[in-house]
Every structure is written in C-alpha cells, then in structure tokens.
Image (cartoon, rainbow, N blue to C red):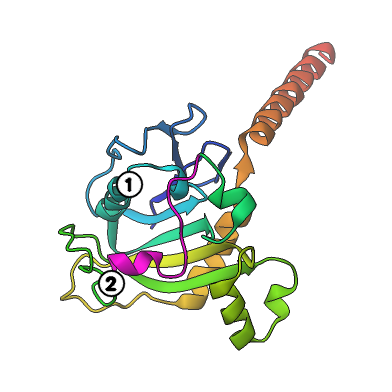
Amino acid sequence: MNRVKLNIGAGKSYIPGFINIDISSKADIQLDLNYDKMPFEDNSVDIVFSYHTLEHIKNYIFIISEIYRVLKHEGWFLVGLPYVTLTEYNLVNPYHYHNFNEYSFDFFSDKKLKGSAAETNSINFHKVFHKFNYIGIFHLIPYPFRHFCRRHLFNVVRSIDFGLIAIKDKRKKIYNVNKNRIIKEYNLFLNKRIPYEILKNKEYNFFLKMLRKIKHYWIGR
C-alpha cells in the first residue's frame, strides 16, 4: 500500500513521492501554513516531513495541530530545525519566530510536559528520537562535557532532528515504533530533497532531449 507523505515547507526544495506544500507557487499545493487548513481528511496521512520550516511560522500551534489532525495513529512526524543557541543563523534571524531544543516537543506529550501551560489542545506526540548536529569538534567531546557545553555555551549545536509519532487513541498499543527504521527513513528523505532550480533544469534538459529525438526521427525518414 502506498503511504501518503507530505513535505511541509517545500518552497526551496521538493521530495519525489511526497505531496509538497508551501506558500510558494512552486509547491504542489500552495498554502499559507499560518492560516490555511490542509486539504486532507483527519487521520489520512502516514508521514509528514518538515525541514527548517516551523521556525518561520508565526501561528505555530495552528500548524502543529493541522499536522496532528491529518496524521494517522502512529503516523510519523519527521522534523529538522535550527538549535536554539545557534547565534548567527538562528537567534539573530528576523524571519525566525520560534526556538527549539531537545525539549520542544515534550510540551505535546502527555507523558512529559503537556498540560504544564494549562493548554486544552488535543495534540499528543510521542518522541522516538532526537539527534544533535554538532558544530566542529564538539561531537568528539565525551558525553558529560558535550552535555555541559550544549547547555551553557552558544554555537555548539547547529541543528536538531526529531522523529515523532502521533498518538490518536491512548487505548491502543503502540506497535510500529522502530527507532532505527525511522532514523534511516528520515535521512533518506533528507537526501532525496531536490532544489526546484535543479528540477527546472532537468525538465528543460528533458524537453530539449525529446526535441532532438523528434528532429532526428523526422530527418531520418
């Protein structure tokens, strides 16, 4: 069975086999992710992928609630984001409205911090993994010191990746949580992204190739 896969924030690159969504007209579906509901039924999507997009969305709770709404029970939410203490490309970026660290999605887990802000939304995600992408030699430092640096210094971690699953029915057991598989697919999707400019060039080159074949056919008759 084919999985329904969405790429949220596809303004600069798209992923083959995904439905690519963004405010940009380049995307398959053009939406303002701050306000527009996604044109999918509840519990109809298997995977939502989003890479360095959520920090740009002012109406953050709205897009998280929309992602949660369309995902199936145990559907995957795979996310890449800048790390909170990255200065040059995050904290001073005027187009970033939110900051993220390893605890960001704990506020959407009823096993962790959900309810700490007296919120009433139904969003419930279980975090399968988070992965730090360290800057320079910090990934070589032994864990206790790396942990200290991450908590107390700037520019130790460049970005952070998450693998989450949507919990729609707490009465159901969670069966499909294979951490290694989810990490592997996240990396696969990440490497499959193609900038639209390259896609345009490919389509143009394909068109030229077809014209040459047609020309060769008619001349050779």
Left-right relation of 191 to 11: right
Q: With 5 as the anchor, is 208 left or right in this view?
A: right
Q: Is residue 64 above or below residue 142?
A: above
Q: Amino acid at mark 2?
A: Leu
In the rendered view, would you say 171 is above or below 121?
below
Q: Looking at the picture, does residue 60 appear above or below residue 208?
A: below
Q: Which residues are magenta?
A: 95-109
Q: Residue at x 24, y 68 (%)?
A: 114
Residue 116 in which image quadrant? bottom left
Q: Please tell me how crowded label 1 is: few (under 14), some (14-19), or many (20+) other residues with Cα within 10 Å.
A: many
Which quadrant does the C terminus fall into?
A: top right
Whether 135 is among the magenta residues is no
N-terminal-most mark, 1 or 2? 1
Q: Residue at x 58, y 56 (%)?
A: 190
Percent coordinates x, y for residue 22 in the rendering: 44, 36
Give the Cα separation between the discs numbered 1 and 2. 19 Å
Q: Residue furthest right?
A: 220
**Quadrant position of residue 155:** bottom right
Residue 20 x, y percent position in the rendering? 46, 40
Is label 1 in a helix, a strand or a loop?
Answer: helix
Circle 2: element type:
loop
Residue 117: image x %, image y %? Answer: 22, 63
* Pointer 2 residue: 113
**Amino acid identity at mark 1:** Ile
- Above-or-below relation of 215 to 18: above
| Residue holding disc 1 | 63
